[in-house]
Amino acid sequence: ASVKTWLEQRGWDNAAGTTRLGQRGWDNAAGTTRLGQRGWNTPICCDQGRYEGGDWGLYSGVGKTCLLVRFKDGAFLAGSFISTVGIDFRNKVMNIDRLKVKLQIWDTAGQERFRSVTHAYYRDANALLLLYDVTNRTSFDNIKAWLTEIHDYAQQDVVLMLLGNKADATQQRVVKREDGERLAKEFGVPYMETSAKSGLNVELSFTAVAKELKHRSMKEPNEPKFKLQDYVNKEMKSAGCAC
Ligand SMILES: Nc1nc2c(ncn2[C@@H]2O[C@H](COP(=O)(O)OP(=O)(O)OP(=O)(O)O)[C@@H](O)[C@H]2O)c(=O)[nH]1
């Protein structure tokens, strides 16, 4: 969709095509604007999926909350696992291309019993971070079903990223990186492996999504298209990452 269409789909008026980021809910100098309040930029971490038969399974524990806490506070939530109830919100201010941006991030519960709640939220998301757990084959196998679900319910041009989390757990790994890459390629979504425990690619994944959204809203007619996967590859390469 054109930028104009994209903005209109989100209820922004762009008649003159001249409005700028600050007017669109990107954080201002006072740090008071909330993207989420304006229908903006709300990546969700989610892990639900559907078995072939069509029933939903339980996909709790892939590390959504830990990834978010790592991103927001730079820490790893070690110890006992407390499952998210319903939905949780966290805000984080980032600097994107010299602009201060506040993201509102929705952390969804992975348990089946909360599915109707979480379902309602991803329809309004501007971006979705879709997680599986590299130590849990079922969580990976159900990504296809989850992508179908996104196709059916999320906004048509939602920004997507597939993340294989728990990459630090080398001993327990059952899903190869190549499998994740292949699946991402098949569905045309950017992909990388992350670790909430070590911090691997956590900042990068959120930054890449925020950049994509910012580029979409700010795009000048002659500006080249921002390519999320290229950006991610370049950043990983320059960090010397063999991941
Ligand atoms: N080794 C390792 N463990 C992780 C990582 N991320 C999360 N965990 C562990 O996985 C378990 C579940 O993490 P959560 O972040 O609570 O999982 P969740 O996906 O939010 O679960 P729900 O809220 O039930 O949907 C916890 O015991 C974490 O310590 C990671 O990157 N590496």
Image (spheres, rainbow, N blue to C red):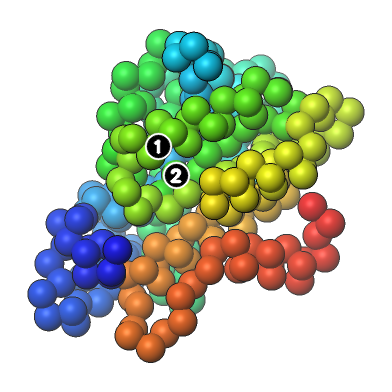
The label number, if any, that marks residue 150 in the structure image: 1
x and y, in percent, of residue 212 in the image: 45, 64
**Which quadrant of the view contains residue 28?**
bottom left
Amino acid type at circle 2 is Leu
- Asked if 75 appears above or below 146 in the picture, the reply is below
Q: Which residue is mark 2?
A: 128
Secondary structure of the residue carrying numbered label 2: strand
Q: Is residue 12 left or right of residue 127?
A: left
Most distant residue in the bottom direction? 222
Q: Is residue 69 left or right of residue 109?
A: right
Q: Between 96 and 147, which is closer to the camera in this rendering? A: 147
Q: Quadrant of the N terminus?
A: bottom left
How far is the residue under mark 2 from the one under mark 1?
9 Å
x and y, in percent, of residue 36 in the image: 29, 49
Q: Residue at x 56, y 31 (%)?
A: 143
Q: Is residue 190 left or right of residue 171?
A: left
Q: Between 66 and 166, which is closer to the camera in this rendering? A: 166
Q: Are marks 2 and 1 in contact (CB under 8 Å)?
A: yes
Q: Is residue 65 visible?
A: no
Amino acid type at circle 1 is Ile
